[in-house]
Amino acid sequence: MSSDLWLVPRQIRYENRAFWRNHAAAFFTFAFPLIFMVVFNAIFGAQEISAGVKAATFYTPAIVAFSVVNACYTNLAMGITAVREEGILKRVRGTPMPAWVYLVGRMGESVLVGLLLVLVVSVFGAVVYGVPFPFERLPELLLVLLVGSACFCGLGLFVSGLVPNERAAPAVVNATILPLLFISDVFVKLPPDNALAQVANVFPVRHLALALQSIWTPEASGALNLTDVAWICGWAVIGLLLALRTFSWEPKG
Amino acid sequence: MASAACVPRLPGRAGEKLAEPATVPYAPGVAAIVVQGLRKSYGAVEAVHGIDLTVREGEIFGLLGPNGAGKTTTVEILEGFRERNGGTVSVLGHDPANRDREMRARIGIVLQSAGVETYLTVSEVIDLYRGYYPHPRDRDELLALVGLADRPRVRVGSLSGGQRRRLDVAVGLCGDPDLLFLDEPTTGFDPGARRQAWEVIRGLTEKGKTVLLTTHFMDEAAVLADRLAVMNAGTIVAEGTLDEITGLGSQDTTIRFQLPEGAAPPDGFDGLKPADRGGFEFSTADPTPALHRLTGWAIDSQVELTDLTVTRPSLEDTYLALTGQAAERAERTP
C-alpha cells in the first residue's frame, strides 16, 4: 500500500500533462467560471445582494464554490465516464497497479485544477472587482476547499456510475447539478427562509457556498459554521459509498 | 500461499510445490493455463458450459469461434475481469478470480478495443504503463518491436488505426509478460501490417512466452497457432493442432472450374453442382484420377476449363462445419 502511494503523484503528473494538452478543454475550464462572474456582475453590479454585501463581494466566493463543483463534480464525472467507455479503466485494471491509484490520481488532478481555478477566480475578483482575498482566513479556506473537493469528487464518481454511455454524460451531469446551483446561493442569492433554499439545505452545494461566503464576508455571513462543514463531510461519505455501488470498470455503452 | 500450510505435507522432493486442494495443479514449464469445468452464466443464460482447456508454456494457443460462442467470456475470466460460476482455473499458478498482483505483473492483455490517453505521446504512454510493472521492458525496444520506433513523439490521437493497434500491443508487452492475451490483434490491418504483426507475435514464443490468441481470421490462426480450440455455443467443439482439427472435417478435395458460356457440364462426376460465379464444383476423395478424367473430357470436347482450382479442406472449412456456419453460408450463396 505505502509503496503504491508514490504511484499517485506520478499518475497525477501524466493526467495533468494530458489535461493541458487539450487546449480547448483547458481554456474553457478556466474561462467558464470567469464568464459567469463577469455576467453576474454585469447584471447585479449596482445592487446589494444582501445587507451590506455588494454583487462583486457575493459573486467572488459564489463562483469559487462553482469552480470547485465544476472541476470536481462536472469534469470528473464526465472524464471518468469517458475513460470508462473508451476502455481505459479496463486496460488499467489489467495491470499490476492497484486500480484505486488510477482513480485517486484522476481525483487528485481534478482537485489540483479546482484549486488553481479557485486561485484564478480569487485573483480575478480582487483585481477586477476589488474584492480582497481573505488571507487571514486561509486555514479555514483550505479546510473548506479540501472537504468540498473530496465531497464533489465522490459525488462525481457516483454519478459517472449512473451515466449509461458517454453521450448521456453531459445531460445527466448537468441535470443533476445545474438546478442545485440555482437554488444554493451560487448563481442567485435566496432568502434563508425560502422553500427552495430549504430544499437546497439537504444537499452539499449550498453548504459549500455558505461556508465560502462566511470566509469572504464574515461581517455579513458570520463565522464559518461548522454545521456546513459537517454537511459537506457527510455528503463526501455518502458520495463515496454510493460510488462503490454504481462504479463500473467496464464500458456500459 | 498461506493456505498451503494447512494442507498436510505429502512426501516429496524439497522445494516441490504442493497443489492447493481447490485449484488445478500448476505445472511450471508445462502448462501456463489450466481450465477445468469452467462455467459462466449471465442471469439464466449459461454462456460457458463447463469447458476444459490447457495452454502449454511457450506455445501460441488460438481460440476460435463465432461471435457469442463464449470466447471473450472465457478469456476475460482468465484475465481476471470476470468471475466464474463454476470450475477451476489456473493462470500461471494463480486463480485469476483473486486478481493477484503477481499474476497481473506476469500477464499482458491486449483487449479488442481499449482506448489510450489521447493527449499523451507514444513514448509517454509506453512509459506510463511501464511504470505499473516491476520488471518493465525497455521502451525503445518495445517501440522497435511493434514498428513505432520512428513515432515516439507523436500524440496518440494523431496515430492511424493500425498504429494505434500496434501501440496496444506494445502497451500489452510493457511488463515483459510471460503470458500475453491477444484479442483480435490484427483487425483493421492491411495485409503487410498483418504479416509484420505475425512476426512480432511469433517472435515472442522464441523468448519462451506464451500467447493466448483470440481471432476470427482463420489464416491468422493457421499461421500462428501451435494448437487451437474451436468454441461454439459455450463449449469447445474441437481442440488440437491445425492438422488434427482440419482432420476432423471432410478430407475430400474440392475441384472447381468454369466453362465457356453455353457449354454443358460433363457427366459422370458425382456431386457436381453449380458453384459461385457460374462455375461448377465437386468434391472427391481421389483427386488425381478425377482431375485426369475432367481434363480428358475437356480436351475431347474442346472446351476450355477456366479458373481450375484444386483445394484441400482448409481450417476455415472445418471451422464452418464445426460451428454450424457452413449451412448458413450455403443458404446465403445463390
Image (cartoon, rainbow, N blue to C red):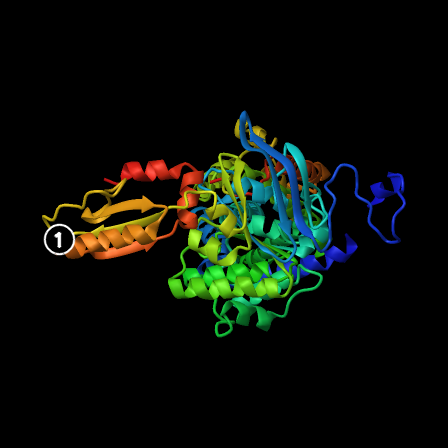
* Left or right: B146 in relation to B160: right
* Left or right: B242 in relation to A109: left
Q: Nearer the viewer, residue A234 or A19?
A: A19
Total labels: the figure holds 1
Q: In which quarter of the view is residue B329 placed?
A: top left
Q: Position of residue A37 (x, y in %)?
A: 49, 52
Q: Position of residue B182 (x, y in %)?
A: 54, 53
* Left or right: A135 in relation to A35: right
Residue found 16% across the figure and 52% down from its top: B259
Q: Nearer the viewer, residue B17 or B108?
A: B17
Q: In which quarter of the view is residue B108 placed?
A: bottom right
Q: Position of residue A34 (x, y in %)?
A: 49, 55
Q: Which of B245 and B44 is in front in this view?
A: B245
The residue at which mark 1 appears reads as B301
- Does residue A226 show up? yes
Please, what is the three-letter code of the amino acid marked with disc 1?
Ser
Q: In which quarter of the view is residue B219 placed?
A: bottom left
- Work out which residue is located at the far left of the displayed protein and give it: B262
Q: Nearer the viewer, residue A25 or B188?
A: B188
Q: Mark 1 lies on which chain?
A: B
Residue found 41% across the figure and 50% down from its top: B314
Q: Position of residue B319 (x, y in %)?
A: 44, 44
Is residue B125 depicted above or below A51 in this figure?
below
Mark 1 lies on a secondary structure that is helix
Q: How crowded is mark 1: few (under 14 residues within 10 Å), some or many (20 or more)?
A: few
- Work out which residue is located at the far top of the displayed protein and give it: B44
- Does residue A186 show up? no
